[in-house]
Image (cartoon, grey):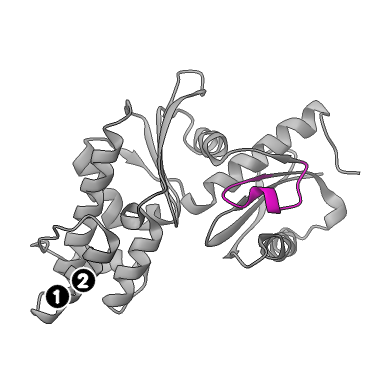
Amino acid sequence: MIACGIDSGSRAMKVVLLDEAGEVRGSSILPTSSPPGKSAEEGLSLALERAGALRADIGAVTATGYGRKSVPADRRLTEITCHVRGALHTTGDVRTVIDIGAQDSKVISVGPQGEVEDFVMNDRCAAGTGRFLEVISGILGTDVSGLSDIALASSAPAPISAVCVVFTESEVVSLVAQGYPSADIAAGVLRAMALRMHAFMGRIVTREPAVFVGGPARNEALAAELGARTGLVLRVPPDPQLNGALGAALFSLENMVAGDYIRG
């Protein structure tokens, strides 16, 4: 039997399939469509194809994320819970989880037994999110991955003062017009984002081991800047964008083993 986890994000649908030994058999990441259930079905079909498995092989489905209530599942859990579970699985010991998603960012304080002690969430401003990085990348003629490569080539990050995505966009356009190198603009934007995240994290106790997850965690320059600003050594899982779906799949697996629910 296979355990399934689905993380229905605002911009990406993530699916992870685990076998009974807890090994990843298949996964997928697709843009979230409307309704979310449609992209969940597409993502599940793709993950099953990659796993060489059938729908009948699925023992349980746990959904998490922004659109979890719109995804067919046996169980639904918050992304806070699933991100901690996924991070614990990949890194072994976690006391802080930093998740930057497409539309919000979260910092979670984790207890010694893996329990959620506290968390803060920013879902009112886009200036610390993956969507923000997409906007800036577009202005600089690259994608989020390319933004990291460009920023790593900078030796003098441009001064970015704005903390709102709208004003930062205007500021970046102005810097481009002034002839600032793209590398310096990219580095300046990531530094400003890291500083904003650091201020946000001041509302909660953070400590190591610390794990950075979510799509933007693949941005090496951002991870390095965030670590430098916070003073934390940040661990980034091999597939940080799948962390929430992995946590959901692990909950499915645990319940399958306990016999709490099996899809009929």
Examine the structure image and report whether residue 71 is included in the region drawn in magenta.
yes
Position of residue 152 in the picture relative to residue 132 (left or right): left
Which residue is identified by label 1?
174
Disc number at residue 220? none
The answer to which of 26 and 186 lies nearer the viewer is 186
Q: Is mark 1 on a helix, strand or loop?
A: helix
x 29%, y 69%: residue:
136
* Percent position of residue 49, x then y: 74, 64
Q: Give the range drawn in magenta.
A: 63-74
Residue 250, quarter of picture: top right
Disc number at residue 170? 2
Mark 2 packing: few (<14 Cα in 10 Å), some, or many (20+)? some
Indicate whether 46 appears above or below 93: below
Mark 1 packing: few (<14 Cα in 10 Å), some, or many (20+)? few
Q: What element carries label 2?
A: helix
Quadrant of the snapshot with the C terminus: top right
x 58%, y 38%: residue:
78
Q: Which residue lies furthest to the top in this view?
A: 112
Q: Which amino acid does label 1 sit on?
A: Ser
